[in-house]
Every structure is written in structure tokens, then in C-alpha cells.
Image: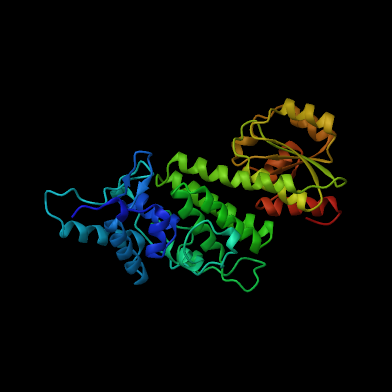
Amino acid sequence: MSVGAADRWRIGVLASRVGVSETVLRAWETRYGLLQPARTAAGYRLYGPEDERRARAMVEARGRGVPAAQAAAEVLAADRARMPADVPEPGHPRRLRAVAPSERAPVTDPDPQPAVPAPARDRAVDGPPEQVSDQVADDASDHVPGGDQAAASPPMSGLRAQALTAAQAVEDLHTAMVAYDTASMHAVLDRVFATVSVESAIREVLFPFLRRVGEGWENGHLDVADEHFASDVVRGRLGALSFAAGSASGPLALLACTPYESHDIALKAVEVVLQRAGWRTRFLGAHTPLESLKVAADIIEPDVILLSGSLPAAFTGLGSTVAELVAAFDVYLAGRGADETVAERLGATYLPGDPVDAALRLSRVRNGASP
């Protein structure tokens, strides 16, 4: 039987009909080929009754606790079994990543906990927010480090009476990210920042999310495009926070990555925490030549200079300019590439820990307290 235009809908309508969010439907379509939309002349996707039937079957299977990847495979297998041989099969996988399904890691599917009911202004998807979070546990071949323990993690620090966990927020971000759904990623972040402090959000959500994306890229489950997209969203939110914060009279920090360091998101997080602690900052970012750093330092006359690097190689071969900086300024090192040995060799001070730890330690040191 043919399907008329009246029997096809945009994804928001389909989401309302089956009771899950647009983000979840996009993830099911992208990862598993569960949905087969037609396209209008203008390029819009339109979903029909067969898509609705498969989506409802998926919802029913997920309600029984079946992992997302397994549920999708069962729904598509049932479709193939009932379909005549000369009819094209549904569910041809549309991969975000250049990895065949047989190459994916075994699927685990931690049972997500309910998310915080979001204010209406924060909702970027259709359907009740509790359904959004209950359904977004997807293919966990890129699962949160710690597996079931991460899924059962306690609520984030500073939470009031809500049930949002760090693991759930990371899961929601990841589901939106694989669908390239910027609006839903920002909706998740809006809820996180409305619930916990900026420091807790950075430590317990943003950087665990970035680690998960990085691990997915390293093991081939995510494409470089996914990593760039996720990083851009996080960098943008941190940039907005650093623009909003700041002090007119606090100590001044000059922040730069070494000439060999291309990743500056961690340093941007340090800047945000320092600003919230009353510091003024000047941010130079990735691949900063030391000669240029010295020129900037001579003009700015900062109270401290903070150099960041994610690998030990970032702090090798820095030359005599570091010695000149150390002689004229208080220089600190941070990032996974730094340690006490590197700091001692360069004559600098090491700030251990994650970006939040590093910023708070620096504040304590400048205030005369022990780190």
C-alpha cells in the first residue's frame, strides 16, 4: 500500500508520536539505520508509518531492558523476516565512523538514571524530559570509562534534590554528539550548569565527556569529525564562561600552551576557574612561540605565567627563552605532560591535578596558603 504525503511527518512529529526525543531518533537512525526517511525536493526528511512501527518496537524493547544495539538488530531482523525477497531491506547502516559493524567493540548498555526535569526554556527536544534521558542509552561500544560503575555514579557534587548524575549527563551529551545535534548538546549543558557549580560541571561532565570522545577516536569507534565537533561545542561554552567572568583588580595570569601543544581546552578551563576566583587573565592559546610569549609578558607584566602541555614532548626543546621567563616571572606548569621533574628542570613550579585542581592550587599559592 502506498503512503501519501499526509502519512509522513517531520522528525519532531514522529518523536511526539512514539514518545522519545528527536535526539534519540536521530541516533537510532544514524547508528543502526532503524529509520528510512524519504526526502522532499528541499531536502527535508519525512518519516512514515513503517518508521513509526520500528521506532515503537525499539521503545518497547528498550523498556524491557534490551541494549540499544541489540534491540535495533532484533527490530530490523524481524522486518527482514516479514519482507518479500524482492523488496529492499530496511536498516542499511549509515555509519558516522569509518568502522564496519563487525569491528565495533562488544556492546554494553548501562541502565541510565532519570535526568533532571528541565525548565521549559532549556528543552530542545519534544517529549517529557524523563523519557529523553531514559531512552538515550545508545550503542555503548564507546561507553563511559568504568562501565556499570560509571552508570551508577552518585549525583554530581552540589546537586539539590534532583537525580541527574554525571554519567547520565555525559551519556546525554554523547548521544547528541553522534547525531551532530548542537541544540540538544547545549540543552544538556544548560541543565548541568543550572544544577551544579561551574567547577563541578568542568570536572565531572565536560572533561569526562571529552575523554570518552578521545578514547572513541583512538580506538576507531569515532571519526576525527566527531572529535572536532565535540571539542568545538565544549570550547565554545568555556569561552562564553570566560567572557562572562573576570575581575578588575585581582592578580593577573598569562596563559599559554607550549609551542608544541595543539590542545588548549584544558587551559581554557583553567582560565574560567581562575576568573571565578577573582583573577584577571590573558589567554594566548595553542602553539604559542616562547619568543612571542616573552614579548606579551613584557607588555602585560603578569603576576604569573602558566604554560600547559598534554604530553611530555610539549615541554622538551624549549630553549633559553624559558630561563629568561623564569628569571623575570613566576612560571607554573600544568597539564598531563608536566610533572615535578619537568618543572624542576625548567625552574618552574608544577601544578598537579585536573584543570580545576590546577587553578585552585594556583589561587591558594598566591594567597599564601600551601598548595
- What's the colour scheme? rainbow
In which quadrant of the rendered view does residue 65 lie? Answer: bottom left
Q: Most extreme residue toward the bottom, as rendered?
A: 161
Q: Nearer the viewer, residue 168 or 52?
A: 52
Q: Quadrant of the N terminus?
A: bottom left
| Picture layout, residue 353 above or below residue 118 | above
Q: Residue at x 64, y 58 (%)?
A: 193
Q: At 59% across and 59% down in the image, what residue appears?
A: 122
Query: In the drawing, does residue 261 fall left or right of residue 114?
Result: right
Q: Position of residue 310 (x, y in %)?
A: 60, 42
Residue 338 on image: x %, y %: 65, 43
198 or 102, nearer to the observer: 198
Q: Give the percent coordinates (x, y) of residue 100.
A: 30, 45
- Compare residues 288 and 169 and report the one nearer the observer: 169
Q: Is residue 15 visible?
A: yes
Q: Quadrant of residue 83?
A: bottom left
State the image coordinates of residue 198 (x, y, percent, origin top left). 68, 56
For the C terminus, which image quadrant?
bottom right
Q: Is residue 339 visible?
A: no
Q: Among all residues in the image, which is located at the extreme left?
A: 85
Task: State left or right for residue 105 relative to residue 152.
Answer: left
